[in-house]
Structures are given as C-alpha cells and as structure tokens.
C-alpha cells in the first residue's frame, strides 16, 4: 500500500486552498504516554466524554463550541453591553440573523438544545408526530419529551455508508406522504429538517429537495423547521454540486434555502464560530409570542436568553464571518483533506465525506465485534489509547433505548466521528490523525469489544461507563 499522500500535491493543474487567516495566538498541547492514557481511559470508563481534556492530544470530540474566534470577535467581546434588558448586542444579533438567515423574529438561547426545548414545547401537542431527516440525539429527545413520536424520513441511501449519493441528507417525500396518509396531516406537528445531517455523516440536503418538500407541506399546512446548526456547510455542498448554484455565493444560497422553511433553531457553537450560544428564529408572530414568553421561564429574558451581551456580540460577528466563501471552502477543505488521506489508504469511512467530520465505519473496522459489544465505542477508545486523539461514538450507544420496549436501538450506522473544530488545527495535525487511524485499523483484528457497566437514563452516551470484555 502506498502510504504517502504525495499524490494529492501532484495532480496536474491542482491549485491548493489555504486558510484565509494567519495564527495570532497559540495554545500549547502535549502528547501523553501510553501508560498514562491507559490509566485515564480506565478512569473514564472507556467513554471519551469522561476524559479530562488535559489528557487529550488532538481533540476531535466535537466541532461544538471548540472553534477559534477571530480578532474581530474577541474585540466584540469587549463591547458587551451587559444590561439585563435590551442589550445593544441583542439587536446586533437579531439583525445578523434577519440579514443572513432571513427570518423575521429572533429569540436567543444558551445553546442549541435550549432552542430545541422551546420549539418542541411550543409546536408539539402530545400524541403528534415529528418527521425528520434522521434523528439528532438532543433534538429527538426534546421532541419525545414534548409528547411526539419521531419518524425518520431520510432517503434510504443515507443509511448506507458506501452509497455516493451527493445529497444523502435529502428527505424521502414518499415517506412523508405515507406518514400523512397513515396518521393524518393534523397529527404531524412539523418537519424537523437538518442541513447538514450530523448522524448521517454531515450529509447535505439539496435545494431541489427542500423546494419540493415545501410544496408537499403547503398542501397539508405542515410547517418545516430547520436545524440550521451546520446550514452554512450545507450551502457549500449546494454551491459545489447542484446545477445552477455554482455562480451563487454561500450567503445567497443560505438565504434561499431558509426561505423554504418556516423557522430555524441554531447551535451557534458550530457554524456561527463561537464557544457558547444559540438562537431560534421564526416568521409566525403567534409562535414567536409563545417562544418569547417561554424563554423567560427556561433561559432568561427574551433579549439575552441565557447569554451575556458579549456572547451575543461574538455570535453576530461570527454569523457574518461564517458565510464568507473562502472561510467555508477552507473549513470543508480541511475535513476533505483528512478524508482523502484515509480513502487513499483504504480505511473504511462514510462516503462522500461531509462537512464537519470524518466518520469511521466501525462495523467494517471490527466485523468480529457484534453491535451489542459497541464497535464504535471500542474504536474511539482504541484511537485514544494509540495516540491521545479524542473522537466520539455515533452508533448504538448514541441511539439509546427504545422508549416502548427498553431494548437498545440498533442503528444501521455504527460510526466513530473525528470532528474537526473550525480554525483550530493545521494540516500537520490532520496527517498525525490519519496515521493514528491507520495504526488502529491495522491492529483491528486483535481488538476486543466492550460491555456496558453503567448507563444513565437520558442521552446515555455522555455518561455511560464500559469495561473491556
Ligand atoms: N442539532 C445538531 C445537528 C447538533 O449537532 C447539535 C449539537 C445540536 C442540535 C444541539 O446543539 O449542543 O448547542 O445544544 N451537536 C454537538 C455535536 C453536541 O457534537 O455534534 P447544542
């Protein structure tokens, strides 16, 4: 096997992208030794969420809240108007959401799940259904806790890690239609549309798909709410892959996409390039009234929603930076660089490579480990042991238990996610990661699975503990 990545630099006529920034401040990190990592992993119950960050070398647990802010954002932090009510920074945030996402009314929240909580309570009547393009952990739990049953309506291709469909996040309109026929349109609270789809591997939704979805939903009066967490990255894939969009900017595509939806919730910790924050935005005044009233109970007054003034200022600036074409190109470009290395070395990953992460296909790493011995959790543990790289399980542990039967839910995708923070690591870090993954892949036949020894009731993946079998 040719292990050198040199072929990438040698394609005739290739012009490389580079980051549209230079580094002004650095944070030292250090490699740990194998004995210390073994001890730390046992202390953490083989769960990468329970590792201490200081024991991690390259942290690819998540792209959430881990971005590097720009000098402009840090300068904005000094302009925090820390008033309880009516902070100037709220109005800046509100106008940035209106300008770039196009919604009318904005409610700030402390992060994405705060927004999910409010929207689920306001828009779901117990006994209703929510249809979504694959679930996300916190999103589905809030919908279920508000009394809804979640129905997955993503296209079948999304469940196949090797399928090369360019828009694997698309909604299967026939699945939506069948749900409406089965339960009745008034029983469908809303469509929960995510762009990109995190659990499918950061896969995008096409403009054509959201346009048709809107036509279908309009016939039945069903609203579409968008999980806009990584919608900027989704816009990049539309620009790259969908006929008619090559000449449009990311900002134009983002706004057009949002125009087909009735509102959105946001984890600003991703696309919006901040360490904390979120928001909800809708076009309907009555729904806004309800949300604006409810935010006071759970998050804070409707002009701060659990955030400091400085946090809202950083989000407002981040929104504008995030939609710049050169930023998105280098962000997705770095993820793709890692994906190209692993693909060239025949490491099984979800294809096509998505916007925010590489998803290792743990089923193909460990065909000898049954799913109830947690192949993806095992892979995350092995990667940490090998090189201090932290990743995240996105398989049977994350899927949790069926609320009716109490059994594990067995998702088709059993993945370990290497999530790339925005503007944080260099290409050399990506090389180190690729080599570590290859070492773990080569040792795979000798690797044993894990058993669950402690499991919390909600979102078990965050705090569950394991032991080696
Ligand atoms: N929606 C999506 C698609 C997400 O990926 C997340 C968080 C949320 C909503 C919730 O937002 O964390 O701000 O409360 N995803 C993180 C991740 C945790 O690592 O993928 P939050």
Image (cartoon, rainbow, N blue to C red):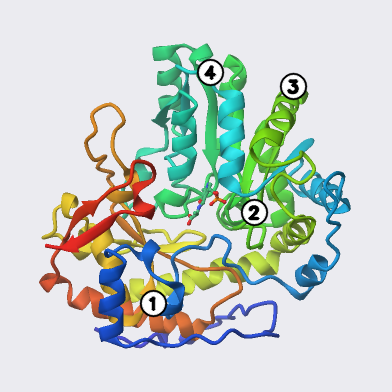
Assign a secondary structure to mark 2. loop
Identify the residue shown where x is 28% and y is 48%.
455
Q: Earlier in the sequence, mark 3 or mark 2?
A: 2
Q: Which of the two discs, 1 and 3, sits closer to the camera?
A: 3
Q: Which residue is mark 1?
A: 341
Say whether residue 156 is left or right of residue 248: left
Determine which of the numbered discs, if any, sits on residue 268 in the image: 2
Q: Left or right: where does residue 419 sit relative to residue 303? A: left
Depth-wise, is mark 4 or mark 1 nearer the camera? 4
The Cα atoms of the two marked residues, 4 and 3, are separated by 16 Å
Residue 430 location (% of width, % of height) = 45, 79
Q: Nearer the viewer, residue 43 or 120?
A: 43
Label 3 packing within 10 angstroms: few (<14), some (14-19), many (20+) = few
Asked if disc 2 is less than 8 Å from ligand 1, the answer is yes
- Camera-side residue of 250 and 295: 295
Q: Residue at x 59, y 81 (%)?
A: 15
Residue that numbered label 3 is attached to: 286
Q: Is residue 204 above or below residue 355?
A: above
In-image side of 246 versus 8 (left or right)? right
* Residue drawn at (62%, 52%) of the image: 235
- The percent coordinates of residue 327 (x first, y second) are 67, 68
* Rendered location of residue 468, percent (x, y): 16, 65
How far, Cα to Cα, is label 1 from label 3?
A: 50 Å
The answer to whether 180 is drawn above or below residue 23 in the figure is above
Q: Quadrant of residue 189?
A: top right
Return the disc, 4 or 1, that comes first in the chain's sequence: 4
Quarter of the image with the C terminus is bottom left
């Amino acid at each position: 096997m040719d292990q050198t990545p040199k072929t990438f630099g040698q394609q005739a006529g290739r012009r490389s992208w580079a980051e549209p920034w230079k580094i002004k401040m650095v944070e030292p990190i250090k490699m740990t030794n194998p004995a210390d990592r073994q001890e730390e992993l046992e202390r953490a119950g083989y769960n990468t969420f329970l590792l201490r960050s200081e024991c991690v070398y390259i942290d690819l647990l998540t792209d959430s809240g881990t971005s590097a802010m720009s000098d402009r954002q840090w300068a904005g932090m000094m302009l925090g108007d820390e008033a309880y009510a009516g902070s100037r920074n709220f109005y800046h945030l509100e106008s940035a959401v209106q300008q770039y996402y196009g919604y009318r009314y904005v409610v700030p929240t402390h992060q994405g799940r705060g927004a999910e909580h409010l929207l689920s309570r306001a828009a779901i009547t117990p006994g209703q259904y929510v249809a979504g393009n694959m679930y996300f952990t916190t999103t589905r739990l809030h919908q279920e806790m508000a009394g809804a049953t979640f129905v997955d309506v993503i296209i079948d291709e999304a469940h196949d890690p090797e399928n090369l469909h360019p828009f694997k996040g698309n909604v299967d309109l026939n699945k939506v239609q069948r749900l409406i026929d089965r339960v009745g349109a008034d029983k469908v609270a809303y469509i929960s549309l995510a762009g990109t789809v995190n659990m499918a591997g950061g896969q995008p939704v096409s403009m054509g798909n959201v346009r048709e979805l809107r036509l279908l939903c309009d016939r039945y009066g069903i609203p579409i709410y968008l999980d806009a967490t990584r919608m900027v990255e989704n816009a990049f894939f539309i620009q790259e892959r969908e006929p008619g969009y090559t000449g449009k900017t990311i900002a134009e595509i983002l706004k057009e996409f949002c125009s087909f939806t009735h509102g959105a919730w946001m984890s600003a910790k991703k696309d919006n390039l901040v360490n904390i924050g979120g928001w909800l935005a809708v076009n309907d005044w009555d729904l806004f009234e309800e949300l604006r009233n409810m935010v006071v109970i759970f998050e804070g007054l409707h002009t701060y929603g659990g955030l400091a003034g400085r946090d809202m200022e950083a989000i407002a600036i981040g929104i504008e930076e995030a939609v710049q074409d050169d930023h998105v190109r280098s962000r997705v470009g770095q993820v793709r660089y890692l994906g190209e290395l692993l693909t060239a070395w025949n490491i099984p990953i979800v294809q096509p490579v998505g916007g925010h992460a590489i998803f290792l296909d743990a089923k193909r790493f460990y065909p000898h480990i049954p799913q109830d011995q947690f192949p993806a959790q095992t892979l995350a543990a092995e990667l940490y042991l090998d090189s201090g790289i932290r990743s995240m399980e996105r398989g049977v542990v994350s899927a949790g238990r069926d609320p009716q039967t109490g059994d594990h839910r067995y998702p088709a995708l059993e993945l370990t996610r290497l999530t790339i923070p925005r503007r944080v690591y260099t290409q050399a870090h990506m090389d180190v990661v690729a080599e570590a993954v290859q070492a773990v892949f080569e040792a795979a036949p000798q690797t044993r699975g894990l058993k669950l020894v402690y499991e919390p009731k909600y979102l078990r993946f965050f705090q569950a503990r394991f032991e080696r079998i």
